[in-house]
Structures are given as C-alpha cells and as structure tokens.
Image: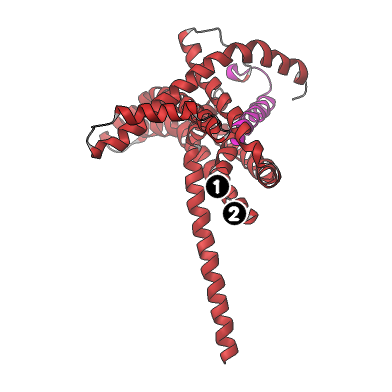
Amino acid sequence: MSGLLALLDDVAAIAKVAAASVDDVAAQAAKAGAKAAGAVIDDAAVTPAYVHGFDPKRELPIVGQIALGSVRNKLLILLPAGLLMSSFAPWLIAPLLMLGGAYLSFEGAEKLWHKVFPHEKQWDKADHGVGDPTHLEKEKVAGAIKTDFILSAEIMTIALANIPKNTIWLEAATLAVVAVAITVVVYGSVALIVKADDVGLWMSLRGRLGLSRALGRGIVRGMPGFLNLLMVIGTVAMLWVGGSIILHALHEMGVHGPYETVNEIAAAAVDGVDPAWRGALRWGLTAAMDAAVGLALGVLLIPLATRVIGPVWQAVFKGKA
C-alpha cells in the first residue's frame, strides 16, 4: 500500500512539473509572439493580395494551401534550424535579427516610397485572369509561400530571441506553439477578410431585416477602406518593429549608443507627466522613434536593394522557381 501511495505521489509530482512546463510554454509563446507583432501584421496585410483575381470559390482553398505551406515552413525548416542555431551558434541570432529588421525597414520604406512616387505596376497574369487558372493558382500559392518563408523566418527568429534559455524541448515546444498560433491567427484573419465582402453581399441581398441588409451594404462599401487601413497599419508596424529590432540587436552586440539615446529622449520627454499616463506616453514616443529609425534605414536600403541585391538575385535564381 505504501508503495502504491509513493507511486501516486511521484505521478502527482510529474503531473505538476508537466503542468508548470505547459504554463511556461504558453507564457513564453505569448511573449515571443507579441514581439513578432510587426511581421505578423504585415503577413496578414500582404496575403489577401494573393487571392485577388480568382474565382471566389477558390479563395478559401488558396488561403488554406498558403497556410499549410506556412506551417511546413515554420515547423519543418525554421524550427529545427532555429534550435540548432540556439544550441551551437547563438551568436548568430543578433546578426540575423538585424538582417530581419533591415528587411522589415526596407519593405515599409519601399511601400511609403511607392505611395509618394507611384510607379507603373508590373503586369501579373493572375491579376488579369490570363492563362490556365489551375496553373496560375499554383504560381500564386508558390509565390505566397516563398514570401511567407521570409516573414516566418523573421517571426521565428524574433520568438527565439525572446525565449529564456531552457531545455531544448521546452524551446522546441514554445516555438511550435508560436508557429501554429501565429499561422492560425494570420490565415484565419485572412480567410475572414477575403470572404467578408461575399458575406456582406449575401446579407445585403438576402437579409430578412432592414438592419442586416444595411449592415451588409456597409460591409461591402467599407472593405476597400478597411484593406487600405490594414496596409497602413502593416507598414507602420514594419517600420516600428524593424527599427526596434535594429536598436535592440545593436545593444546586444555592444553598440549601446542608439538604444540608450532613444530611451533617454523618451524618458526626458515624459518627465513631469502624470504617472498615470507616463508609461503609455513613453512607450508611444519610443515606438515613434523606433519607426523613424526604421524609415531612415529603409530609405537608405532602397537603392541598394533595387539596384544591386535585386538584379543579382534575379540573375542567380532566374528560372529556378
């Protein structure tokens, strides 16, 4: 009997440890996922464009295919690579974060640049329904998954950098939770966005109440503006997170000046402000300065990316889709 009680005590102790580990994974995943907000918002803002021009019946299947590719990117390639890097080359994390921050800054700055200085859009067969729909769909999905890989790499690197050093299994579980949760959030949101106008149209035509029909018409009319707002939020988030990553990575690598300067300016600006508002105001000022850093860096990178890196990339990988 005493042996059975001892066994039950051991089982209870193991269960408590397992429960604590699950709590740790959830808490760390939430923290790491929050740090990747800019890349996540950009992912959600960019993806709806990939279903543009297709039969509405194919929209959700296309989103599903991209989501599946995103999960594969994160779990089968990026998660093992991240764990290997964390175990054997942790010094690579800060430089890779800087590359990711530079990429986000460039993307955000380029979007603003094209708004200020519009250029002719490149012809896209899928946008105009030219060619075999099945082949065009495969091309669009493949292109979306490639774009997702870049954003997913940034998300996973940010998450990895914000996970406290622990056992490799806990790190793996946390990264897996981040990968799955972010994919569900991003592509669940995308599915809702791309079908919202169809739902609105159905409500406007078949709603039983005048209120529901009016709401449907409002959804249809409001979706273009909402998508534009989402793109603006995504652009601002990219610049903010890109600049923040650069400053933090430099700080981690021993270059403290830029990071400390931003924090000192923010602290001085809120000195004397009501304590109830001080924290939020300081965060807002810091985020604005991070975004300014991201914008400045992105503008500097535009000629390098478009005139050097882009042409070289096309020359090397042309025809290797």
What predominant SS class does the magenta segment belong to? Answer: helix
Q: Is residue 165 above or below residue 223?
A: below
User: Residue 170 at x, y = what percent?
Assistant: 59, 55
Where does the magenta region start and end? 127-153
Q: Residue at x 58, y 43 (%)?
A: 160
Quadrant in the picture for the N terminus: bottom right
Q: CA distance from mark 2 to mark 1?
A: 8 Å
Find numbered disc 1 in the image and state the secondary structure of the residue it sits on: loop
Would residue 143 be counted in the magenta stretch? yes
**Left or right relative to 116: residue 317:** right
- Name the amino acid, label 1: Ile
Q: Name the residue that disc number 2 marks.
A: 166
Decide: few, some or many residues near mark 1? Use Cα within 10 Å; few <14, some 14-19, many ≥20. some
Q: Position of residue 190 (x, y in %)?
A: 50, 34
Q: Residue under circle 1?
A: 163
Whether residue 270 is visible to the viewer of this picture, yes or no, is yes
The residue lying toward the viewer, choosing from 43 and 65, is 43
Residue 210: name its quadrant. Answer: top left
